[in-house]
Image (spheres, rainbow, N blue to C red):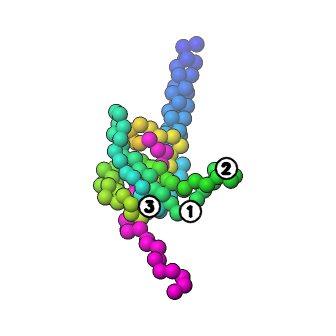
Amino acid sequence: MNKYVKIGIIVLVVILTAVGYWRYFFVFSEGVKAGNLNYFEKKGFVFKTWEGRLVQEGFQSPSAGALQSNEFRFSAESDEVAQKLERASGRFVELRYKEYLNPVPWRGASSYVVIEVLDVSEPQKENSQMPFN
């Protein structure tokens, strides 16, 4: 009987480890998002992480008849990424990110983690001329 208990404990540990990895460390998707950086700040009680919001062009509607701005909330992976984004508030940025199934406190408050800043540029100004003179 003692042999079966040991095997059962080992199987349980392996299953719990696999589920924990899948929920918190498995990269569900990777990609690039672009838009105007609305804010970027370091916050948290125990784990101070960099959090930001990117506002993309266009609108999305989670329910019929409602409009809402298309925003992307994210956490920054490293201090190198954070240094590039600190001075980019209000500018157009392109960010490479990874999406995890669930956040962990030391990685950030978001499931989306920015791993690289591809481009930072001035926001495009709309043409101030009227279409008719």
- What residue is rendered at 31% in x and 58% in y? 87
- Which segment did they paint magenta? 109-133
Q: How many marks?
A: 3
- What residue is rendered at 53% in x and 30% in y? 16
Q: Do the residues labelled 3 and 1 touch (CB within 8 Å)?
A: no
Q: How far apart are marks 2 and 3 (CA)?
A: 24 Å
Q: Quadrant of residue 93?
A: bottom left
Q: Distance between the residues labelled 3 and 1?
A: 12 Å
The residue that label 3 is drawn on is: 36
Compare marks 2 and 3 and give the one earlier in the sequence: 3
Q: Is residue 44 above or below residue 78?
A: above
Main secondary structure of the magenta stretch:
loop
Compare marks 3 and 1 and give the one earlier in the sequence: 3
Which residue is outermost to the front? 133
Q: In this view, does 18 lie above or below 123?
A: above
Q: What's the amino acid at mark 3?
A: Asn
Residue 83 appears at what percent x and percent y?
30, 55
Label at residue 63: 2
- Residue nearer the viewer, 84 or 55: 55
Q: Distance between the residues labelled 1 and 2?
A: 16 Å
- Residue nearer the viewer, 14 or 1: 14
Residue 8 appears at what percent x and percent y?
56, 22
The residue that label 1 is drawn on is: 58
Q: In this view, does 56 lie to the left or right of 82?
A: right
Which secondary structure lies at badge 2? loop
